[in-house]
Image (spheres, coloured by chain):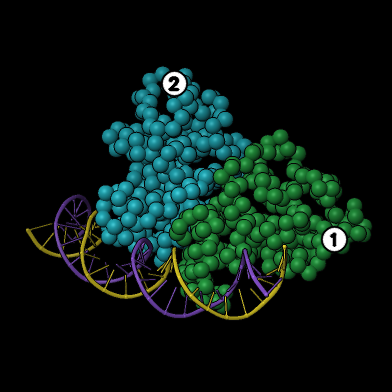
Chain colours: A cyan, B green, C yellow, D purple
Amino acid sequence: MITLLIADDHPLYRDALKGALSLNWPDLNVLEAGDLNQTVSLLQSEDVDLLLLDLHMPGSNDLFGLLHIRKLFPGLPVAVVSGTEDATIISKIVGVGALGFIPKTASSGDIAEAVEVILDGDIWVPESVTGHLEEVDESFSELADNVANLTPSQYKVLCYMRDGLLNKQIGYNLGIAEATVKAHVTAIFKKLGINNRTQAVLIASQLELEPPVQKQT
Amino acid sequence: MITLLIADDHPLYRDALKGALSLNWPDLNVLEAGDLNQTVSLLQSEDVDLLLLDLHMPGSNDLFGLLHIRKLFPGLPVAVVSGTEDATIISKIVGVGALGFIPKTASSGDIAEAVEVILDGDIWVPESVTGHLEEVDESFSELADNVANLTPSQYKVLCYMRDGLLNKQIGYNLGIAEATVKAHVTAIFKKLGINNRTQAVLIASQLELEPPVQKQT
DNA sequence: AAAGATCTACGACTATCGTCTTATGCGACT
DNA sequence: AGTCGCATAAGACGATAGTCGTAGATCTTT
């Protein structure tokens, strides 16, 4: 009996994925989540064998969210589902600890195969990029490592920083004092080896694979 | 008699490009530049018919540099040369005013054709993306427009801001007082419709197509 | 149980940011 | 000659950022 968590903000695609997989695993237990918060709380309460994660999910922030989940649940196999086919991006995803990458264009056969391989603990990527997996840049993985070592609170603060919010606004959103936000900010700087918020924002935005449209405030 | 400026930080590739083109245009006048500063000064002193611009050139900062040049020399035809084949990125490049996009994998025949088309004032993109050119997001082009309207000094200040420098450090690098830097910063904010440096950095980093490795300071 | 490490939280203090005002010099356009 | 935009820069001021010390809570280690 296998329990699977499909995390994707598109309900139709969740259904399609579920359908494709239930053909091969009749006794499949499928959980669903539409954003990163739901995903995390489900992972905390349920016993999940594999997470299928859409990188572009609300609250996920691409690699940023993947790192977060990898840190919170180190043993959990994660397969990333996304629309891109770019070998460089897929390399980064795998380099950051995902056990596989399933393009949204994959056939149900491919998907089933991918899930099987990943449940076995191996890595699966689309055939088109099998030979093109690049070595991930050393400083990039160091960066990813540093970001992964942020505590949940620090992670949230960094997310808000990357949206251009002031410490005061971040505190309001998180229900904590500005002084506490500042403490988190300082801790983030130390972990990332930097000394001001601009550099932090840059690092965070580099973990975005497809930057969203800039919010004009 | 056609004068061409090849701006690429790779001397070998400049030679290759020059070679490919001189086959078709025996009386070609080729200038070369290795970084953005050289490019700008050559454009100021020489009469150039077409600029072949490598986006990943030192000082160029991808779209950022292209916008800068488009603003300084609005009438100059620019063809972008780059390694990517991503239709989304190419769409942005064209949307920002480049008359063409030449992938580094292009054959010398393709290159010659591209240059010919562009000198005629038309747009040339690789066949593989001809049908896939996307409409550029409205807020993106608005953003690009705003950035393009920065003055040269403001542009430089924004570049340093994006590197995480303090106003004081920027002033030192540019040989001007911190007070002047602040004046520029405020002006930048007004032009971009924002109100703090974090948002400015975010905008700048969105104009990077392939973010460089983070500089650990 | 005691010690140590980590996370979260917050106030006090200093540094930097960002705005505003004012001013000078310069070149371009009318 | 006058106006405009741009670059430069000073002084003053409030807002924000960032550091430091402290403290309670939790968890692990000894």
Position of residue B131 in the picture relative to residue B117 (left or right): left
Residue under label 2 = A22
Same-chain status of marks 2 and 1: no
Q: Chain of mark 2?
A: A
Residue under label 1 = B3
The amino acid at mark 1 is Thr
Instruction: Place residue B43 in its image quadrant.
Output: bottom right
- In whole angstroms, how far apart are the C-alphas of marks 2 and 1? 64 Å
* Number of the label disc, if any, that sits on residue B164: none
Against A74, residue B60 (above or below) is below
The amino acid at mark 2 is Ser
Quarter of the image that includes the N terminus of chain A: top left
Against C11, residue A171 (above or below) is above
Q: Residue B77 location, x and y as percent? A: 77, 54
Q: Residue A15 location, x and y as percent? A: 45, 23
Q: Is residue B80 visible?
A: yes
Q: Nearer the viewer, residue D27 or A171?
A: A171
Instruction: Place residue A182 in its image quadrant.
Output: bottom left
Circle 1: element type: strand
* Crowding at mark 2 (Cα within 10 Å: few <14, some 14-19, many 20+): some
- The residue under the point 71% across, 34% down is B131
* Crowding at mark 1 (Cα within 10 Å: few <14, some 14-19, many 20+): some
- The residue under the point 46% across, 60% down is B197
- The residue under the point 39% across, 23% down is A28
Labels 2, 1: front one: 1
Position of residue A122 in the picture relative to residue A160 (left or right): right
Circle 2: element type: helix
